[in-house]
Amino acid sequence: MARIVMKFGGTSVANLERIYNVARHVKREVDAGHQVAVVVSAMSGKTNELVGWVENMPKVAGSNAPFYDAREYDAVVASGEQVTSGLLAIALQSMNINARSWQGWQIPIKTDNAHGAARILDIEGADIIRRMGEGQVAVIAGFQGLGPDNRLATLGRGGSDTSAVAIAAAVKADRCDIYTDVDGVYTTDPRIEPKARRLKKIAFEEMLEMASLGAKVLQVRSVELAMVHKVRTFVRSSFEDPDAPGMGDLLNPPGTLICDEDEIVEQEVVTGIAYAKDEAQISLRRLADRPGVSAAIFGPLAEAHINVDMIVQNISEDGSKTDMTFTVPSGDVDKALKVLSDNKEKIGYDVAQSESGLVKVSVIGIGMRSHAGVAASAFRALADKGINIKAITTSEIKISILIDGPYAELAVRTLHSAYGLDKS
Ligand code: ASP
Ligand code: MG
């Protein structure tokens, strides 16, 4: 007997037929004697529709009332998950499974006060554990909790992944299965490189990098949480036949296991290639090379909530002037340039130049820690294809390379084969 949390995303519960199919996946685990809790997203497209309603409410002409109240946004937007949790409980009951739906406030899943992007602070797991012990399946609405103001709070888009991992940690589950419309995590985006392979295992830290670099399988926060609480998390498909051979395998079900690196015996040097589109580069020319310039630049940008990523500072030739280059999301470039020009006197630079439409391609793998020359092979491979590198940053387990947008796909494929990821 194991304790399993199963999470189903929006496409997996998109209509009644799919919800019925989800119930069959749950039944398989219940019939195998496991204790099960389920977390559901809203039907696909539902949350977008609800957000649209909130945003498009007509306003009194000339009113300067706030755009909308974040508490009421949460009240509306959390409803999608309420519907699917109830419907799945009904489907399970029709299969003679003892099931009950739960909203975030009923458990309660306690969050902070950041309505619309709340963080989970605490989950009271005892009652759910007791019911699981009595054979009841808890069907829990994802994406929502209860704020300190005693009101519904939602966890930010994609937040039901985080609900699932947090619940898995709270009930000390053996495994958290994230069912989605893809059958696992791949070495790179299969739409760009058809030779991409599904990974059997990936370490938490690697998945964190993949997720934050645009591999949109999981909400980044859920991976952080899984890493902290060491929740063994499985990414797998809900579209396979629930009763196909191997689907109920406790140790090796089909999919990708995200786990502690100690569990990965045959560690490759490089695990995957990720990319992030719509990056922009800003260069400040002829800055005074003195203590405090970086603070003068990045302080005001941070205050304006602009997310700065790669930062490269040149060594000055004469010890007095230098150049600083950094990247921001393309959508923030005008705002960033405005902040910089407002602070031009204080920072003390000559000109600010910018370029949008760039792409950051990253090579990820914990094996890099113990292998030399990983970066050099990336640079060689890109050079052979005539791809120009605009900036580079590295960490212990990642090399990120900034290039011109049109070369993105070629760069991804080039790096994917340079590290032999297309060979099984
Ligand atoms: N339904 C929410 C969203 O679309 C939460 C989720 O699906 O994870 O963002
Ligand atoms: Mg999702």
Image (cartoon, rainbow, N blue to C red):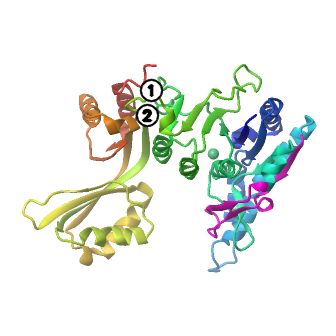
How far across and how far down the image is residue 319, in percent? 9, 65
Q: Secondary structure at mark 2?
A: strand
Query: Which residue is depicted at the point 42% across and 64% down?
Result: 306
In primary-sequence order, the first of circles 1 and 2 is 1
The answer to whether one can see residue 186 in this image is yes
Label 2 neighbour load within 10 Å: few <14, some 14-19, many 20+? many
Quarter where residue 79 is shown: bottom right
Is residue 41 highlighted in magenta?
Answer: no
Residue 266 numbered tag? 1
Q: Secondary structure at mark 1?
A: loop
The answer to whether 34 is drawn above or below residue 47 in the figure is: above
Taking the image as shown, residue 246 lies to the left or right of residue 318, namely: right
Quarter where residue 288 is shown: bottom left
Callout 2, which amino acid? Answer: Gly
How far across and how far down the image is residue 137, in percent? 83, 43
Quarter where residue 366 is shown: top left
Q: Which residue is mark 2?
A: 272
Label 1 neighbour load within 10 Å: few <14, some 14-19, many 20+? few
Is 175 in front, or is 245?
Answer: 175
Marks 1 and 2 sit apart, C-alpha to C-alpha, by 15 Å
Is 378 in front, or is 335?
Answer: 378
How far across and how far down the image is residue 377, in percent? 27, 31
The answer to whether one can see residue 84 in this image is no
Q: Which of the two marks, 1 or 2, is nearer to us in this view?
A: 1
The answer to whether 354 is drawn above or below residue 359 in the figure is: below
Taking the image as shown, residue 349 lies to the left or right of residue 405, namely: left
* Numbered marks: total: 2
Which residues lie in the magenta part? Answer: 98-126
Is 78 in front, or is 118?
Answer: 118
Q: Is mark 1 within 8 Å of ligand 2?
A: no
Is 112 in front, or is 331?
Answer: 112
